[in-house]
Amino acid sequence: MIQIRELSHHFKLGKKDQKVILPVLKDITMEVGKGEIVSVVGKSGSGKSTLLNLISGFIRPTEGDIWIDGVQVSELSEAKFADFRLKHIGFIFQSFQLIPSMTAYQNIELPLILKGEDEKKRQEKVIRLMEKVGLGDFKDHYPSELSGGQQQRVSIARALVLEPTLILADEPTGSLDSETEAEILEIIQKLNRELGITFLIITHDEEVAQTGHRTISIKDGRVMKGGAAI
Amino acid sequence: MKLKDKYRFIRQNIKKNKARTFMTILATAMGCAFLIVLASIGYGLQQSVVKETLEDQVVTEIQVHGKEVENGFEAMTVADIEKLEKVDHVKAVTRKIQLGQLPTYTIDGYKAETMAVSTHFPSEIASGLKLAEGRLPENPNEVVVGYHFSNTLYMETDEDIYDAETGEVKEEFQFKGEVKDQTITMTVQQDEEGKVTKEIPLKIVGVLEEPGREWMLNQDVYISQEVFHQIEAFTGTAGGEIVVDPENKVTGHLETFDQVNVYAESLESVQGIVDTLDEENYATYSIVSEMKQINTLFTIAKAGLILVGTIALIIASIGIYNTMTMAVTERAPDIGIMKAIGANPKTIKQIFLLESSYIGVIGAIIGTIVAYATSVVVNIGLPLILETAFDEEMPEGLQFSAIPWSLVLIAVTICLVITILSGMRPAKRATQIDVLKAMRREI
Ligand SMILES: Nc1ncnc2c1ncn2[C@@H]1O[C@H](COP(=O)(O)OP(=O)(O)O)[C@@H](O)[C@H]1O
Ligand SMILES: [Mg+2]
């Protein structure tokens, strides 16, 4: 599903004349197979989020290549990458990233609108998904009117609505209490089991990492273990 | 993303900031209305001037003043007339010769002093000359007179006939009867001293139609060529001239014409005839050529007014730029999220361009409505104001402001182009928003 070859990334800091280069990822080679749940663990600041942002196309790698589903995404233009994201990848963020002026329903509907689906089809899908993640009664609630767990369910529903083959999750339970965390992790496992969706989950929590089939650990920007697919 | 959904999006966005959007639309509407009203003055005055000039004027008439030669002008001769008559699409060529002296005319106790003109009636008839009453002359001693001829007749008396205040002939001395079918006596002089005179009895058989414009007077007496020749024979000078330098005295018949008019078959053929005559070096004047000049002048004026109006719209566009920039900044986190889940930069750009065009379209619509209302008020109000201020009556049907469809089209197009252009940069900025920064709420 995901292949990463000799990926390196550094950030340029400071002003023009006195630039400081901050190397974050060094020579990363790893793989995520179809249908896997892979956890990426590592201490805070080890470069996990940067790795995920590179895979997502939010930033571009200094060196190396990334393939998703056989497509060399690291070569795609910004617009093409956006289309690719819309069609193939679902996202779950630590801070949910819901649009506050839109209701739960509208947030979940957004990817369908962007794809250009017609209204009837949208309604069917959104309603079905809301029932599935247990938000049937919260259609017209705004994010600010929902609990953290509920918000994360909205964001999971949004990630699922275009039926992606891959979901990228950066600390999906980082803002939730342990009870809610367990619920969310259960949903993830269920989606993997029932729909065969591949998950790449970033966490600094060993317990969360246990949900995955496999763990890749990163330290100081290098893969310490678990880079290869099973 | 469907257009309908984009539209729904911007509707939601606008709803979130009604006041700001409203003010921006207002500024745009004002700019648009200003442009239209300003330019409409140009259109209105042009319409009034053109209408005024064309009204009751013989639009197919081409006046030929003479022939340009190396150093000056040559008067029109019989040969010229024959040549003009052969030009394509010429309906008639009228020619008039003025008598070289001012004769007096008397009708039982009333007297007039006015120009005598020899004219070629067949061509006048062909050109469409119309009589107010009576008929055209059929024999040499019959004449027709201008519409205002009777006004020049006054009683022969020793009293002061002029009104001291108005300078006009007093009511009681004016001629009040009909001139048609009257016999008048025309008196011409043989020389400047006027000791020897000749009396020619003439019968008025017709009166010409009133000239097209109020300020035009036609008091002339149209005599036959025979009478004209009689006078020439009597004075022994060409044209019946009496004030002549004895050394340069020309005898015989006058061979040139004072006033030659060519009449085209139709309005469309006027310009072609004018062009042909210009090639032949004839000096011409036609209302059609004058219209061309007037229209050119007004086109320049209108372009200038539209330009000034456009400046108002450009000022309004600063408001749009500001509004859109603020909208982009406010919505940066949302845009970041949308980009993260896969919104194409093009889609985001389109949404913002659509929003600024929306402001432009609504502004243009409101502006056009306001402009129409203003135009009506100006057309009714301005003449009233000017009439009170200058104590002078405005000409009937004078239109200050006119808004043709083309002007609306021009204004709306300018308005849309400017609003879209001013929304361009903010829209581009929206596409460049950094996803990670936006999601961290750093913008
Ligand atoms: N946009 C950025 N500019 C500069 N430095 C960054 C940027 N993003 C992350 N970093 C740095 O890269 C390193 C890795 O960060 P990150 O990938 O967020 O770590 P993790 O998610 O494992 O906590 C940190 O030292 C962080 O300060
Ligand atoms: Mg992180």
Image: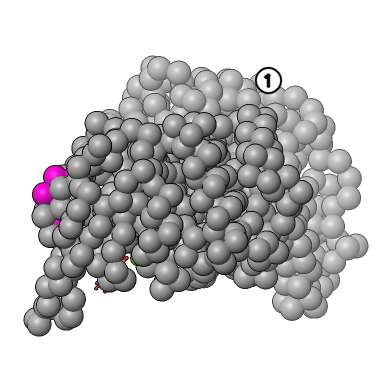
User: Residue at image x 35%, y 22%?
Assistant: B83
Q: Which residue is mark 1?
A: B138
Asked if residue B154 is positioned above or below residue A24 in the image, the reply reads above
Q: Is mark 1 within 8 Å of ligand 1?
A: no
Prevailing SS of the magenta stretch: strand
Q: Residues within 10 Å of mark 1 (few under 14, many from 20)?
A: few
- Let me know if residue A7 is in the magenta part: yes
- Quick check: B83 left or right of B207? left
Res B116 seen here: no
Q: Quadrant of ligand 1?
A: bottom left
What is the span of residues highlighted in magenta in the rendered image? A4-9
The quarter of the rendered structure image containing the C terminus of chain A is top left
User: Residue at image x 11%, y 49%?
Assistant: A6
Q: Which SS class for mark 1? A: loop
Q: What is the x, y in percent for residue B122?
A: 58, 20
- Let me know if residue B224 is in the magenta part: no
The quarter of the rendered structure image containing the N terminus of chain A is top left
Asked if residue B151 is positioned above or below residue B322 in the image, the reply reads above
Which amino acid does the dot numbered 1 rest on?
Answer: Glu
Res B330 seen here: yes
Q: Front-most of B131 and B53?
A: B53
- Quick check: B384 left or right of B290? right
User: Residue at image x 90%, y 62%?
Assistant: B172
Q: What is the x, y in percent for residue B304?
A: 44, 61
Coloring applied to the structure:
one colour
Asked if residue A57 is positioned above or below residue B381 in the image, the reply reads above
Q: What is the x, y in percent for residue A48?
A: 29, 61
Residue B157 sits in quarter: bottom right
